[in-house]
Amino acid sequence: MNRCRTRFGYNMGNLASRRPLPLRFNWPSAAIAATLGSCLVCVLLLAGPAYALDPNKRLTQYMHTSWRIQDGSAPAGMFSVAQTSDGFLWFTSVSQGMYRFDGIRFVPWTLPVDGRTIDHIVSVHGDHAGGLWAVAEHEVFHLKGGVITSHFALEGQNRTGNISEGPDGSLWMLQAGFNLHAPLCHITDREVKCFGESDGIRLPPTGGEALLADGKGGFWLGGQKAVVHWHAGVSEVYPIEALKINSGDGVSALTLDSNGSLWIGLLPQGAGEGLGRLENGLFKSFVTPGFDGSKLNVIAQTLDRNGSLWVGTLGNGLYRIRGDVVEHYGRAEGLSGDYVNDLFEDREGILWVTTTNGIDSFRDPRVATFSTSEGLGSESAVGVLASRDGTVWVANGDSLVKIKNGTVTPIRGGHGLPKDQVSYMLEDRAGNTWIGVYDGLYVSKNGRFRRISEPDHQPLGLVLAMTEDSDGNIWAECSGKSRRLIRIRDFQIREQFPASQIPPGQLARDPSAGIWIGPANGTLVLFRDGVQKEFPIGSTTNLFTNHLDVQADGSVLASYDDGLVGLRQGKAQRMTTKNGLPCNAVYSFIEDKQKNWWLLTECGIVELPDSELQRWWANPEAAVQTRLYDALDGARPGRFGIRSADVSPDGRVWFATGFVVQMLDPSKLSQKALPAEAYIGSLVADRKEFKATSNLKLPPNPRDLQIDYTSPTFSISQKVNFRYRLDGYDRDWHEAGTRRQAFYTDLPRGKYSFRVIACNSDGIWNDHAAKLDFYVASAYYQTNWFRAVCACIFLALLWAAYQLRVRQLRREFNAAIEARVSERTRIARELHDTLLQSLQALLFQYQAARNLFAAGSERAMQVLDTSLDRTEQAIAESRDAIRDIRSDIIAQNALPELLARAGSELAKSQADQDVPTFGLTVEGERRTLTPIIREETYRIALELLRNAFRHAKAHRIETEIRYDDDMLRLRIRDDGKGMDLKVLQGDGSGHWGLRGVRERAQRIGAKLDVWSEAGAGAEFQLTVPAGIAYVGSGDSLPFRLLRKVKAYAYRN
Amino acid sequence: MPTGTKTIRILMCDDHALLRGGVATLLSAEPDMKLIAEASNGEEAVEKFRMHHPDVTLMDLQMPGLSGIDAIARIRSEFPDARIIVLTTYSGDSQAIGALRAGARAYLLKAHVHRDLPEIIRAVYAGQKRIPPDIAAEVAEHLADESLTSREVDVLRLIAAGNANKQIADQLSIGESSVKSHVASILSKLGANDRAHAVTLGLKRGIIDLQIP
């Protein structure tokens, strides 16, 4: 695979004066920055040449594409072109850096050199091992996988295309300069070794610009004044006479052609300069009739894989030389500019040209076109006839045209043929060529045309259809004064059938006898032995029959604007887009030598394999597999053909489209395009770009994810389709079509693998997928440690709740104990204060009475009476105390009843004094109180009532119980003497009651408010939060907790 | 029978009017005794003592305000030869020791003394001391016990009043944890099982009384 290619440079300084500086152009920065990505081992190089430029085609017949700077479709100032083994094309510009091209977009690319920008890259070269050499003026970089693997500074100066790659992947480079004694450098990844005079290189110390490996271990070196062949340490010097006193640019390009001739391109033009060959050791300008190579400023040469030499010039565009045939393609033909910079043939056989105005590519289309560019007088080809001798005749609007060996020759008049419009051509089995022209029908005999005479001297008019039946009768449909069908035998018109008798239409012979007619009335007609037989074709509209053909088995095929109709054994069936036909309007069709069918349709030329046709014959509903050759393949369909399809003896298929002639070679179509390799460029997550590196980590929760991918395919980039899937997300492949981006939104965390495959322009999918593994990181709340922390916190909360509950229980337990203690204390005090004191006092009384008995009974009686009174009093006090102690009464009664009873009893016990009236009101829906609250509330109320009854000197005491939803409220109001501040504040001695009440209230989580003024009565309000007071208020734990918290807050 | 010519002038100090009435009735039957004043709390007792200089003072220990023991101590500090008889409802080593230390000449239980009270008054008036044997035994029994510190007594008193630890801490302006350690110390010193038991023991032994502080 040592395909040698020469690349040539020139002196920039000299050039600047010769050509205007290109307009500076800002390439859209939106383009995604390139990365070589993971460079896959490219198997493509092992594939054979794909679809190289067919040398038999005219230069103008190639598909030419231009990317012009002025349109904004190409970056400015592109000089050198190279292709890396991954398929990408690289363009360099001395001022604009490098661009990577995938067939669709030019992506700017910067050399990753310590943050330094290397702008002055004069050339690039893709080596066969997948690397890329980037050559700056005094430096050379070797890159692999986007990383610089070596970098050397060089003594001399590099020019565009002074490179030759050795078989081992190393680089040979011829440098220019002053006093440069070792101009030829050998560069490997490890070292640079330069060779000069001491190694036998006999070049002047100005070095050289053109380098060519001779394929035998030696080199051809192109210098300022001579060409040197250096081999095994020995130089053969071939001075160029015209460059004897040259001090500027000299040899710019060297090419060895397949015959072993060395083609030498000189930048200067003039006598003995320009383009020439080395003949007998001397340079000789290449001159052929109509071409003078000495007049060219040659800048670049390349030999394509079919042996054609391409020459790029400064000012004269592009030349292709094959043998003696020289073809020119310049600005006038559509080249982006006449000043060429570089030439490069890529691995698909596409020739790339950089000019000062843009980039051009030439590729071989599947469908070739013959138009005015190729010699057609006008673009009005309505018929085509491929004769047995290989000549293709074209019925063109103004003349008959002969195409032979790719040469187009119009025949205007002469040979007995009038100049008028040719409409129909037929070659009969005897080899006679019949030609219908405007005013009649001619038949060629012995190279001369003879007119078929009309028996009634009525001009036949334009011949619209012709056929020869199995008996050798020639039938023709003529549009003279009256439309008619004629039968000719032995060059004489034997019969005429007016249109009223036989419906006019396309004609075809029946294999057994008679002819078929395809009229525009929804039928096909078999006309045999003077009898017409009509077969309806099931069409609702009466469309013209575009083309009619009868096969050997008698099956009839007819094409219409609404599909292809088949008639077999009297039964019609139709093939349309429903069957998979790319479009319905079929203008013409023909069967080639491989028994495949070719259909000229409104959307292009459709290949229908015979096997598919047979499936359709068997099943009219069958879906057929077809292949469409559309405009991108070179097809230019039109609908005005009359006899518009034929197959030449070499198997090529010809169509007249009404405008141009189209030709395709089925045997060459089997050469498939190279498989398309997909590459993943970059990944954009929420507008942040990530390079497609392995194990890419993305930040959590990417909202929008965009993955850019591409495939460097240049034959028909527009037909490269993609499929992708995201493993870990997609279940199936996405059909992306030609879209080169994939979008995802809201990807959850996890590992993903993005795979994309591409299909080439032939529709063949490459199973080898480009793959990008990445993972979306977890947000902190998605991570396991966070969950662990959550679990810990939850457990801690649980533990805290448990502790809280334990403490609460302990507190409740303590409270219960304290309540018990205080209750005991209270009982003890009660006993001490009442019963015990009374009994002790009575003891002294009785003792006194006893002592007094001795002195006199009257006094003793007195003391005893007092004692009895006091005993009675003690009993009353004890009863009070006992009521306080007895909780069974409390347990059995609701609060209002308890208070009503207490009120009335207190009133009764005050019988001797001014008894206040007692009132009790209850508001709100009654609720059941918890036992403790009921008891405590009762005791508080009792104490307050007792105080009011005994000490307030009130007229009225009112008690109000209010059951609110959020609290229980108890109010005791009197209109007595009131209390002073000291008592209210509860720190006064003596009034233990209020203080005790406060403490009780606090203990149960209730709140006691007191309003009082001396002389204005007193009001006490006890409020207990509902959560504490009522039974069953909030059964759920959270609700109870809430209540507790509320109660706690309330308490504080 | 009284033999002296001089009437013994008596100050009665008790917060229960009923009891004062009973004692007054009893003393009224003794011709050589005269109840010259009554007081219902400690301060009043000190005042009345200053006013009347009684020969013998009958002093209850459990009174609101200035307690009996404090009143004894204060009277004794002003009048070192004051003869004071403690007349109390409860026995209890702690109270008895406190009262005797303050300078009481006799320690009598209300429930047991009604027969002998006049006799004892005369004896005290005559300069004698009277401690009933059962009280003397009880005092002797706990003399060797570790006594509660005054702060522990405060804590026990507040416990008896039905306060929780936190409330005790608030009232004494100490930490809740100190209250806890005081409680633990109280339980250990008194040999009590729990707080209620401690209060019972404290009451029994007269370390605290039922007086509201």
Image (tube, coloured by chain):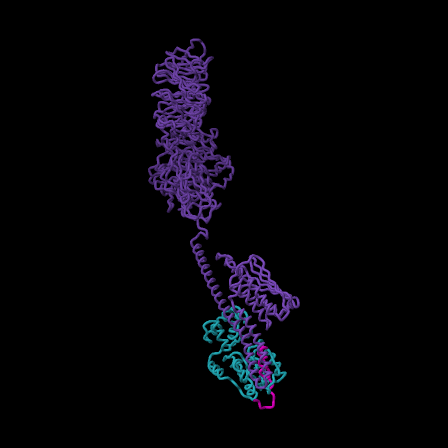
Chain colours: A purple, B cyan
From this viewpoint, which residue is outermost toward the top? A456
- Name the one closer to the observer, A569 or A562: A569
- Work out whether A974 lies above or below A726: below
Q: Is residue A706 left or right of residue A509?
A: right
Q: Which residues are magenta?
A: B1-28
From this viewpoint, which residue is outermost toward the front? A857
- Name the one closer to the observer, A773 or A802: A802
Measuring from the top left, give residue A321's x and y in whole percent: 40, 29
- Name the one closer to the observer, A7 or A716: A716
Measuring from the top left, give residue A223's x and y in whole percent: 41, 37
- Work out whether B105 lies above or below A63: below
- Name the one closer to the observer, A19 or A121: A121
- Work out whether A500 lies above or below B105: above
Q: Is residue B101 left or right of residue A364?
A: right
Measuring from the top left, give residue A863's x and y in whole percent: 59, 81
Q: Any magenta on residue A291?
A: no
Measuring from the top left, give residue A435's x and y in whole percent: 41, 16
